[in-house]
Image (cartoon, rainbow, N blue to C red):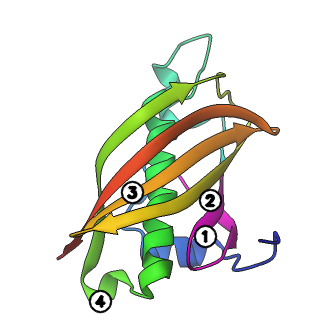
Amino acid sequence: MSVTDGAFDIKEVMSLLPHRYPFLLVDKVVACDNKSAIHAIKNVTVNEPIFTGHFPGNPIFPGVLILEAMAQAAGLLGFKITSSTPGARDLYLFAGVDNARFKRQVLPGDTMDLHVTFEKERRGIWVFKGRAEVDGELACSADIICARREI
């Protein structure tokens, strides 16, 4: 997948995901093949509200939000795989996480590259493999489980 395949900006991200500030954790999509893989970006900035408490004087982006960012990228990929939109009454809910591993801290100023691949779907339950990298170094990896539901 080349870096220009299926790229889309924040406007399309916001047309697909119901999340909004401060919980929208995908800034853009660099590449998406609409079948099995997506590469999204999250720019981590020091003025994000989470850093007032995590941790004062030593800001570290929380691991749970790294997982949420991967889940949001997985939701975007799900919409692209099914060619559906939220207006089509589909919603992807974060249903679980397996095999989560954290390898490095994510700090203000970092750009997280979110790489998510579709693994399988069974009875509305979708499984994705995700990894978050900073400067080519693995920050987190996990299996992301989403439930596709009609709303």
Q: Amino acid at mark 3?
A: Val
Q: Residue at x 42, y 68 (%)?
A: 17
**Within-10-Å neighbours for mark 2: few <14, some 14–19, many 20+:** some
Q: Position of residue 63 (x, y in %)?
A: 49, 29
Q: Earlier in the sequence, mark 1 or mark 2?
A: 1
CA–CA distance in space, label 1 to label 3: 24 Å
- Left or right of residue 147: residue 60: right
Specify the label residue 10 is tagged with: 1
Residues tagged 1 and 3 counted as in contact (Cβ below 8 A)? no
Disc on the earlier residue, 2 or 3: 2
- What is the secondary structure assignment of the residue under circle 1? helix
Question: Mark 1, residues whose alpha carbon is within 10 Å: few (<14), some, or many (≥20)?
Answer: few
**Mark 4 in CB contact with mark 2 (< 8 angstroms):** no
Viewed as shown, does residue 136 lie left or right of 99?
Answer: right
**Dot placed on the residue nearer the N-terminal end, 1 or 4:** 1
Kindly report which numbered mark, 4 or 2, lies closer to the viewer in this rendering.
Answer: 4
Callout 2: SS: loop
Q: Quarter of the image for the N terminus: give it.
A: bottom right
Which numbered disc, 2 or 3, marks the residue closer to the eye?
3
Residue 38 is left or right of residue 71, and the answer is right
Q: Nearer the viewer, residue 151 or 125?
A: 125
**Residue at disc 4, secondary structure:** helix
Check disc 3 and report the residue beneath it.
127
The kind of residue on which mark 4 rests is: Ala
Q: How many other residues sit within 10 Å of disc 4, few (<14), some (14-19) or many (≥20)?
A: few
Q: CA distance from mark 4 to mark 2?
A: 23 Å
Residues tagged 1 and 2 counted as in contact (Cβ below 8 A): yes
Tag shown at residue 45? none
Q: CA distance from mark 1 to mark 2?
A: 6 Å
**Residue bearing the label numbered 2:** 27
Q: Which residue has dot 4 on it? A: 88
- The boundaries of the magenta stretch are 25-41
